């Protein structure tokens, strides 16, 4: 597993790309930010997986296109997450999802 600073571009792993980032929204990935994340993931047509980093280890990844699965992770403001994207529009999807994760404008 790679540890990435969000100032670096996404890394390619076995035909997929991933990024790690710290959640900036005051409510974490709950309610509106979770819905925005899931709808963006679903609309991309790519396979998006999301995991929370706890004590340096990723929790089991969930389907990023499911608002309920995203919310079950219990991601709070300041938590680190890892997002994996696989599909035809990986770069575009990563850029959009990273913007959602790092924004406190929800």
Image: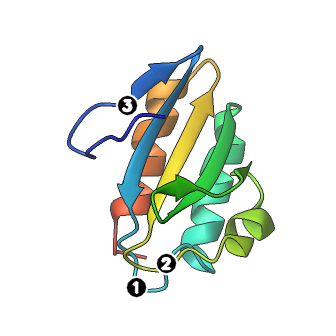
Instruction: Identify the residue at the far bottom of this view.
Output: 27
Q: Are marks 1 and 2 in contact (CB under 8 Å)?
A: yes
Real-space Cα separation, disc 3 to disc 2, in angstroms: 22 Å
Residue 28's tag is: 2
Q: Residue at x 71, y 32 (%)?
A: 45
Give the SS element for disc 1.
loop
Disc 3 crowd, CA 10 A, few/some/many (<14, 14-19, 20+): many
**Mark 1 vs mark 2, CA separation in Å:** 6 Å
Q: Residue 56, position in %: x, y? A: 45, 57
Estimate the x, y position of residue 60 in percent, counting from the top left.
71, 53
In the image, what residue occupies the spot 63% across and 26% down?
86
For marks 3 and 2 on the same chain, the one whose residue lies earlier in the sequence: 3
- The answer to whether mark 3 and mark 1 are in CB contact below 8 A is no
Foreground residue among 41 and 51: 51
Q: Look at mark 1 in the image and give the residue it sits on.
A: 26
Vertical placement of residue 35 versus 57, above or below? below
Residue 96 appears left or right of 65: left
Nearer to us in this view, 26 or 18: 18
**Image height check: is 73 above or below 100?**
below
> Which residue, given by chain and number where applicable, does mark 3 sit on?
10
Where does the C terminus fall, quadrant-wise? bottom left
* Label 2 environment density (alpha carbons within 10 Å; few <14, some 14–19, many ≥20): many
Percent of width and height locating residue 5: 25, 45
Q: CA distance from mark 3 to mark 1?
A: 24 Å
Task: Please tell me whether mark 2 sits on a helix, a strand or a loop.
Answer: loop
In the displayed structure, 12 sits above or below 38; it is above
């Amino acid at each position: 597993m790679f540890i990435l600073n969000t100032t670096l571009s996404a890394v390619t792993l076995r035909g997929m790309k991933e990024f790690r980032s710290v959640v900036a929204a005051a409510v974490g990935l709950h309610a509106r930010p979770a819905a925005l994340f899931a709808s963006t993931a679903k609309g991309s047509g790519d396979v998006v997986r999301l995991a929370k980093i706890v004590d340096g280890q990723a929790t089991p990844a969930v389907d990023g296109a499911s608002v309920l699965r995203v919310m079950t992770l219990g991601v709070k403001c300041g938590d680190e997450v890892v997002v994996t994207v696989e599909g035809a529009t990986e770069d575009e999807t990563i850029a959009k999802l990273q913007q959602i994760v790092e924004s406190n404008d929800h």
